[in-house]
Image (cartoon, rainbow, N blue to C red):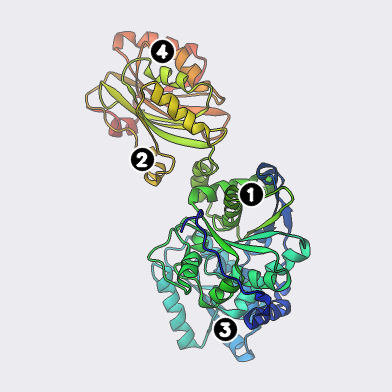
């Protein structure tokens, strides 16, 4: 199911009357998580609130010592162990936040902790677990192989397995997030919670429905890893065939059995979001708090925004979302930056066919008016028509229809690729190649001030004396735009071209001798 067709959970008259919910509430109230965890802030998201026309708060679980809520459940589970179990030690399998949570909780409790991690786990995550006192054992190439080894060690060495979510004590520990939340803001209308294996939403929903049943609890899942939504439709946990890995903290194929029993009683609704919407939420959180959420951590904000788009939410409504973690791989930020504008509906990417002739680029840019072009990829592939990959910044999503209408009226065949995952992940970086014939071509790198209309002004100043045979430009939010430009120019005309480029007073240098250019983009 998509976000537009949400499964509605048939709630009991009062979920708090359920013996299961009452027992979970008791465990939450008794959980000694603050021996190691801390009370985290409930931060107002003022910029996002203004944009959505409602009031939004963010529960900052990124402020935990391990930058994730997982510490709560891990410590509560260890607290329930017998003296014999504590003496023997514990084992867990994880390549993420659960591993750090178990390691730190065990160190604080004086318990040996063996953490199984796949051999593919980045060194930074291994070191993080070791810094918290965990004994890391690298085994297998996947989580499933590491988990199987953890179960074997538990059996052979008498260690107690600490599950990441499918355990009553773990669920109760995570439920303390809701306990703090209602103490910090008693009059909330809705709470949005990220869903992976279900431990967090199960504990939070049980607490909220037991004490404040009028508050709606809404789960948020990636559309390519919606295991709770699938379970609610089937009325039992089901195993997804595959899951997307972008939001790796919630990339779970099957909801936990214990979390599902609570979720079916206490969760009001589930909504799904895509990767672009998650990236946009990472940006929203950063702009309001300067915190950098991991994709799974920003999931609830993405769902909150999606919910507001689909429903009439008034300015008097009070909404809260849980930032569940901030252990992001630094290199993932490049992907997030590329995709957040698309997720916010502030950028569209199009494939456009234009005539292959001098001045065609400039005519096309003028057709777009003063709109900011965020990306322009082109390589000469024939003498009749040119296919360009273009990104355009939008002030509002409805603007795209007007752009497409203008292109049609001007006779430019085009296609909107904004929703094409292949285009956004791969093709945008592959537009180009070797031309069909040898060219008398010179290649230049240049920079110009980044502002609306800058690309059009550059093309106007350059003129149409030389045919553009290659063009690559991408706005990265910097003060200047960087362009790779190929021009067809006869040897006798090179001096005139050099003079024209010098007159533009831009940072420009010739790179025709670049090995990469000669290897990938040049014929002969």
**From mark 1 to mark 2, how far is it between C-alphas?**
37 Å
- Residue with the mark numbered 1: 312
Indicate left or right for 5 with 168 as reference.
left
- Residue with the mark numbered 4: 498
**From mark 3 to mark 2, how far is it between C-alphas?**
50 Å
Q: Position of residue 161 (x, y in %)?
A: 52, 81
Q: Which mark is residue 427?
A: 2
The answer to whether mark 1 and mark 4 are in CB contact below 8 A is no
Q: Which mark is residue 89?
A: 3
Earlier sequence position, callout 3 versus callout 1: 3
Earlier sequence position, callout 1 versus callout 2: 1
**From mark 3 to mark 1, how far is it between C-alphas?**
52 Å
Secondary structure beneath dot 1 equals loop
As displayed, is residue 138 above or below residue 289? below
Q: 283 or 355, which lies in front? A: 355
**From mark 2 to mark 4, how far is it between C-alphas?**
32 Å
């Amino acid at each position: 199911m998509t976000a537009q067709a949400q499964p509605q959970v048939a709630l009991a008259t009062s979920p708090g009357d359920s013996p299961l919910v009452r027992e979970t509430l008791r465990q939450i109230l008794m959980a000694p998580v603050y021996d190691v965890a801390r009370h985290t802030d409930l931060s107002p998201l003022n910029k996002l609130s203004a944009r959505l026309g409602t009031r939004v708060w963010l529960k900052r679980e990124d402020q935990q010592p391990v930058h994730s809520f997982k510490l709560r459940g891990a410590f509560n589970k260890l607290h329930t162990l017998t003296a014999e179990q504590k003496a023997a030690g514990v084992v867990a399998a994880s390549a993420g936040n659960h591993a750090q949570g178990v390691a730190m909780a065990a160190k604080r409790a004086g318990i040996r902790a063996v953490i199984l991690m796949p051999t593919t786990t980045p060194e930074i995550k291994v070191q993080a677990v070791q810094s918290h006192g965990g004994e890391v054992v690298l085994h297998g190439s996947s989580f499933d192989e590491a988990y199987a080894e953890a179960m074997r060690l538990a059996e052979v060495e008498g260690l107690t397995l600490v599950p990441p979510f499918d355990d009553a004590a773990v669920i109760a520990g995570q439920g303390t997030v809701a306990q703090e939340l209602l103490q910090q803001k008693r009059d909330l209308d809705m709470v949005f919670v990220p869903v992976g294996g279900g431990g967090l939403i199960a504990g939070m929903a049980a607490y909220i429905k037991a004490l404040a049943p009028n508050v709606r609890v809404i789960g948020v899942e990636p559309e390519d890893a919606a295991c709770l939504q699938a379970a609610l439709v089937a009325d039992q946990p089901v195993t997804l065939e595959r899951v997307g890995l972008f939001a790796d903290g919630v990339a779970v194929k099957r909801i936990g059995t214990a979390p599902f029993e609570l979720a079916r009683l206490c969760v009001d609704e589930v909504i799904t979001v895509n990767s672009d919407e998650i990236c946009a939420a990472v940006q929203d959180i950063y702009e309001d708090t300067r915190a950098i959420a991991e994709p799974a951590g920003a999931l609830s904000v993405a769902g909150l925004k999606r919910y507001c788009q689909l429903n009439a939410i008034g300015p008097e409504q009070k909404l809260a979302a849980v930032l569940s973690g901030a252990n992001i791989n630094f290199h993932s930020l490049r992907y997030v930056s590329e995709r957040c504008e698309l997720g916010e509906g502030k950028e569209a990417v199009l494939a456009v066919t234009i005539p292959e002739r001098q001045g065609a680029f400039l005519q096309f840019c003028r057709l777009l008016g003063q709109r900011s072009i965020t990306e322009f990829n082109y390589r000469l592939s024939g003498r009749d028509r040119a296919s360009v990959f273009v990104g355009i910044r939008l002030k509002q999503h409805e603007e795209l229809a007007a752009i497409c209408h203008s292109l049609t009226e001007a006779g430019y065949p085009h296609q909107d690729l904004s929703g094409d995952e292949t285009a956004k992940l791969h093709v945008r970086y592959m537009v180009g190649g070797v031309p069909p014939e040898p060219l008398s071509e010179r290649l230049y790198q240049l920079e110009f001030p980044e502002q609306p209309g800058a690309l059009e002004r550059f093309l106007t100043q350059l003129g149409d004396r030389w045919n553009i045979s290659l063009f690559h430009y991408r706005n990265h939010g910097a003060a200047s735009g960087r362009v790779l430009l190929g021009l067809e120019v006869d040897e006798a005309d090179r001096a005139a071209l050099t003079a024209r480029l010098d007159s533009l007073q831009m940072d420009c240098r010739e790179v025709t001798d670049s090995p990469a250019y000669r290897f990938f983009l040049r014929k002969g």
